[in-house]
Amino acid sequence: MRYIYRFIQIIFTVYAFLIFIGFLFLIFPLVIISSFFGKIRGGNFIYKLCHLWADFFLLMTGIFHRNIYEVPHDRGRQYVFVFNHISYMDIPVILKTIRRQQFRVLGKAEMARIPVFGFLYRSAAIMVERGDPEKRARSVQQLKSVLSKNISIVIAPEGTFNMTHKPLKEFYDGAFKIAIETQTPIKPVLFLDTYDRMGYQSIFSIRPGRSRSVYLQEIDVDGLTPDDVDELRERVFKIMADKLVEYKGSWIKRTTV
């Protein structure tokens, strides 16, 4: 029975990737045209296309998303969004979670090397190469520039997948430094089900089912200085980790919490 289930899962994953690639090719000419209109105007339209892609992809793969708001969310305000990074499925779920407000995602530079998808990724995301201090600093400046144009930014402070089976892996400082330096509030968002929809262990693990994102209380940084980065990072870490335990994230082993 286990082998039958595995075979079905592989077939379903192949189907999902065909949906992914097919819609990508459909919107690709519009992405190319939009790229000529600059990072702001063109980028905003590319994100609209990405929203359509995420809507179609999740619908056709039987993944049904909803947002949970622990507090009312002000879409007219700028934020440094931070989320827990646990799956490749985080990418479409980000696009389902944040709607009706402009934002840019900080993404891994290596993703831009994927044929076709890489062009879309470069056009939509702000690239970061963590191993190169000069390029990393340039990415930070780009993020600050985006915030100065009244566009929110989205960062995974863990930097890469959390494979610890704890609620979160350790956070980098970047999101918190930027929030303090630009005096932009932090909005933590939890992805509760992306690990179950596609685990990081294998690309052949896409499964239909529910997807939930939880908007937590925003964290103001008014009056904070660079000396407060460590305290702010640990505060946000604890809030998110405690809530992930409360919502019973499936990757969390209770003995490690």
Image (cartoon, helix red, strand yellow):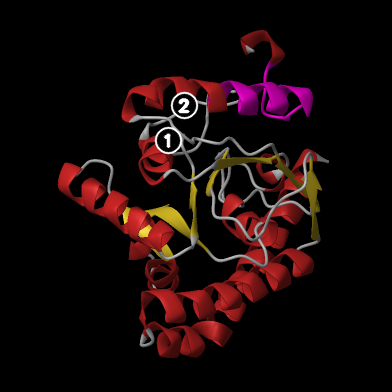
Picture quadrant of residue 59: bottom right
Q: Which element carries disc 1, helix, strand or loop? A: helix
Q: Which segment did they paint magenta?
A: 237-253
Quadrant (top left/top right/bottom left/bottom right) for the C terminus:
top right
Sort mark 2 into few (<14), some (14-19) or many (20+) by Cα contacts within 10 Å: some
Residue 36 percent coordinates (x, y): 36, 87
Specify whether 132 is left or right of 118: left
Q: Is residue 7 visible?
A: yes
In this view, 195 is above or below 111? above
**For the residue marked with disc 1, what is the amino acid?**
Phe
Q: CA distance from mark 1 to mark 2?
A: 6 Å
**For the residue marked with disc 2, what is the amino acid?**
Arg
Q: Answer whether residue 52 is magenta in the image.
A: no
Query: Could you tell which of marks 1 and 2 lies nearer the N-terminus?
Result: 1
Specify whether 174 is left or right of 158: left
* Residue 176: assigned label: 1
Q: Nearer the viewer, residue 180 or 191?
A: 180
Residue furthest top as drawn: 255
* Residue 233: assigned label: 2
Residue furthest left as drawn: 134
